[in-house]
Amino acid sequence: MTNKKNNFCIMPWVSLSVRTDGQLHPCCQTLSSSKMNYFKDLKASPINEIESIIKIKEAFLSDSIPNECLQCVKDETNGGSSMRTIKNGIYSEYIESTSFSLDKFELFEIDIRFSNLCQMSCLTCEPWYSTGWYQYSKDSKVPSAPIRSMEDLENLKSLLKVNSKYLKKITLTGGEPFIDPLHDKFLEFLIDNNLNNVQLEYNSSLSINSESLTKSLKLLSNFKAVKIALSIDAISDDAERIRRGLSWELFQSNAQLIKNALSEKSIYFHYTLSTLNSHFLGDVLVWIHNNFPSSTLNTIINIVHKPTEFDSQNLDPSSRKKSIAHNLKTVKENLLQDVSEEEFNHIMKLLNKAHKYLQGGASE
Ligand code: SF4
């Protein structure tokens, strides 16, 4: 196909990302800019006529890289994979068999932030993503109310109805997605419109009242595939210190509720490496394996780059060395005897990723 050159990215043709303030992007990696249209613009124009997305498509069709996509360029230049390479890989057959034009659009996946409503104020987060942060921010620009992408579900319902035959995956993040007032209504809409065969993915801190989580889980039990990624940066008191506002006890009991209502395999764990927890990775892996063994293979590592003060490459070399030694010792003494070959390989992959970064390597 002549219109799919080296810089091509599939995302503007198959994906949407709705930011906290309603900015509409092709994916969660594109950089925000004043040129982007907003979710409310979908009232006036269908998605294949949204100007800012068309501009991004134009760039890819002429083999240029749009400015909004510099994060992918950076990731690839650093020698790692990027969202672009990952998604082009996932959709490779579709790319091969499809001819792309400016007005083509088939919504395969959408990620949505209803709002920044969140009760927590994790040290590495900021007010833009959490209303819990408002009380700690000295920035006078902090708004007095939650930031919302949409006040009701009407636009979203129309978009999903029109694209229902293509839709494969919906990702809900926030803020804390489970506490947004639109969340349960959205699940009810999906169920009522036979959209419960899509894969639902979440990022959650589990700082949620157990009764309201139980209500949401009852709705989620109608869906074929649900993945709930839980943020875990340390365990017990250390987890509460880094993820300010978290109750470790509530985190554990809510994780059990998910396990009982859905399955242990629905639970994913996301550990975010920063200056605050580089020496807790071993303890976190041991805890996951002891408490949610099926989720060991569902554990991934993210790396904090911003705020730069939390970038673990800023730790002094001796602290980084100590963290690596401590993690290896903890895992060797408490975990490796007790795991399958597949789990062993996955654990080593996670440790290698974190330790390579702590040694000054690029993040992948
Ligand atoms: S190049 Fe990267 S940032 Fe741009 S649309 Fe594709 S995946 Fe998203």
Image: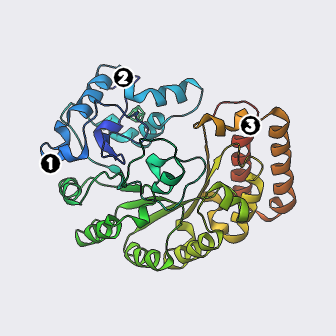
Q: Which residue is mark 1?
A: 43
Q: Is residue 361 above or below residue 274?
A: above
Task: Give the percent coordinates (x, y) of residue 43.
Answer: 14, 48
- Locate residue 117 relative to residue 273 in the image: left or right: left
Pick whichever of labels 1 and 3 is earlier in the sequence. Answer: 1
Classify mark 1: residues with Cα within 10 Å, few (<14), some (14-19) or many (20+).
few
Q: CA distance from mark 1 to mark 2?
A: 33 Å
The mark that comes first in sequence, 3 or 2, is 2
- Residue type indicated by callout 1: Lys
Task: Name the one closer to the observer, 335 or 245.
Answer: 245
Residue 103 lies in what quarter of the image?
top left
> Which amino acid type is shown beneath numbered disc 2?
Lys
Occupied quadrant, residue 98: top left
Mark 3, residues whose alpha carbon is within 10 Å: few (<14), some, or many (≥20)?
many
Distance from disc 1 to disc 3, alpha carbons, whole Å, reads 47 Å
Label 3 sits on a secondary structure element that is: helix
Q: Which mark is residue 237?
A: none
Look at the numbered disc 2 and give the secondary structure of its residue: loop
In the image, what residue type sits under mark 3? Leu
Q: Position of residue 318 (x, y in %)?
A: 85, 36
In depth, the one of 309 and 106 nearer the eye is 309
Q: Is residue 3 visible?
A: no
Mark 1 and mark 2 residues within 8 Å of each other at the beta carbon: no
Percent across and percent down for residue 115 are 37, 55
Could you classify mark 2 by the number of other residues whose Cα lies within 10 Å: few (under 14), some (14-19), or many (20 or more)?
few
- Between 183 and 47, the one lying in front of the other is 183
The residue beneath circle 2 is 5
| Residue 213 horizontal/vertical position (percent) | 46, 74
Q: Is residue 41 above or below residue 179?
A: above
Q: Which residue is mark 3?
A: 358
Which quarter shows the N terminus?
A: top left
Q: With respect to residue 261, does 336 lie above or below?
A: above
